[in-house]
Amino acid sequence: MNHLILYCRPGFESECAAEIVDLAQTRQVFGYVKASGGDGYVCYVTQTPDGARRLQAEIRFRDLVFARQWIAAGPLIEGLPTSDRIEPLLAAAQGLPQCGELLLETADTNAAKELATFCRKFTSPCVQAFRRAGLLSATRDRRLPRLHLFFLDSTRVYMGVSPVDNSSPYSMGIRRLKFPGQAPSRSTLKLEEAWLEMLSAKEREHHLVPGLTAVDLGAAPGGWTWQLVRQHMRVTAVDNGPMASELMESGLVEHVREDGFRYQPPKPVHWMVCDIADKPIRVADRVALWFAQGWCERSVFNLKLPMKKRYQALVQCRDLIHARLGEAGVPFELDFKHLYHDREEVTGYLRRP
């Protein structure tokens, strides 16, 4: 398996490619990238036959910012006959480890929407055939690897596997959330997804609880503040713009009309969240200052990436935070992820160990 397939948001193929090349080269797993803008996936072809599986073993999936999912696959299977697609797929699967689940997937593109209908109809007969052949466990077994069929169209597919403990558990790598109608804006989903994707269950149990204090920089109209209030936290919402009246009626929100880049809390808080639309390096610098000064213990923040050199902008912001907190002698852990509900931005999660 020397093809590592990484699913990503359409339009972010170059960022996904640059990231996997950097990570693979540091582990001396050399290869080349096949990617086209708008396809919604990247293929990293390694020079060694087991290179894709090796990368899955040596890289933490959570360290990949732009990849939603990854599978270690063989070469593209082409020319599947419309009269019988299953037999060629069973033949191609020989030699793979037994898997506990089979997922039929496509890229997250408009062009693939009709293909998704084909995948849904084809899933049941495919699962039955793979189980009869002993390639799939009799019932879903989450201890075994997942088997993926990533269709480019109804006759071309990558067949690959993902380790259950080092990949996304969701089909196409997408956690789908329902927009809460009471929230002031759809941006609320970005913070909810960040908490679900980037915090462990234990962290959510201890750090999303009533009575904690939080600051929301660039809060108006209150999409992120709404999530904080939903956890019964006491929130200082910092923004010169107006906040949703329903939030103010909760009794848990103090609205401070001030520039988020100038505000300093009178005393430390547990959470600082920030969704300010500004240059990413300014936001990263401000987040680093909050931690260096001990003004907060945890932060979720968004970096609005430029249209060009987005990966380089992310690396610059990450390096700045590492340098500032290293100089200040502040221990920290930092993750970034391009979440499903993000657009031209990535979400950061910074916390004390």
Image (spheres, grey):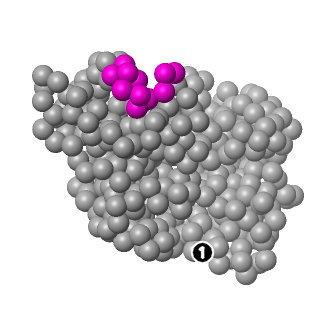
Q: Would residue 179 be found to the left or right of residue 294 on screen?
A: left
- 130 in the magenta segment: yes
The residue at 68%/76% (across/down) is 324
Depth check: give the residue in front, 297 or 113: 113
Count of numbered badges drawn on the protein: 1
Q: Amino acid at mark 1?
A: Leu
Q: In the image, 250: left or right of 168?
A: right
The relative height of residue 155 versus residue 294 in the rendered view (above or below) is above
- The answer to whether any part of residue 252 appears in the image is no
Residue 319, horizontal then vertical, whole percent = 57, 74
Asked whether the viewer can see residue 125, the reply is yes
Look at the image and tell me in which quarter the C terminus lies.
Answer: bottom right
Stretch of the chain drawn in magenta: 127-139
Residue 57: percent from left, percent from top: 53, 57
Q: Position of residue 94 (x, y in %)?
A: 33, 39
Q: Give coordinates of residue 169: x percent, y percent.
A: 52, 37
* Disc 1: CA contacts within 10 A as few (<14), some (14-19) or many (>=20): some
Q: Residue at x 83, y 35 (%)?
A: 210
User: Residue drawn at (65%, 66%), measured in percent from left and top?
Assistant: 286
Work out whether residue 318 or residue 62 is closer to the camera in this orientation and state it.
Answer: 62
User: Quick one: SS at disc 1?
Assistant: helix
Q: Is residue 131 left or right of residue 225?
A: left
Disc 1: which residue = 320
**305, above or below 245, in the image:** below
Q: Is residue 51 above or below residue 233?
A: below
133 drawn magenta: yes
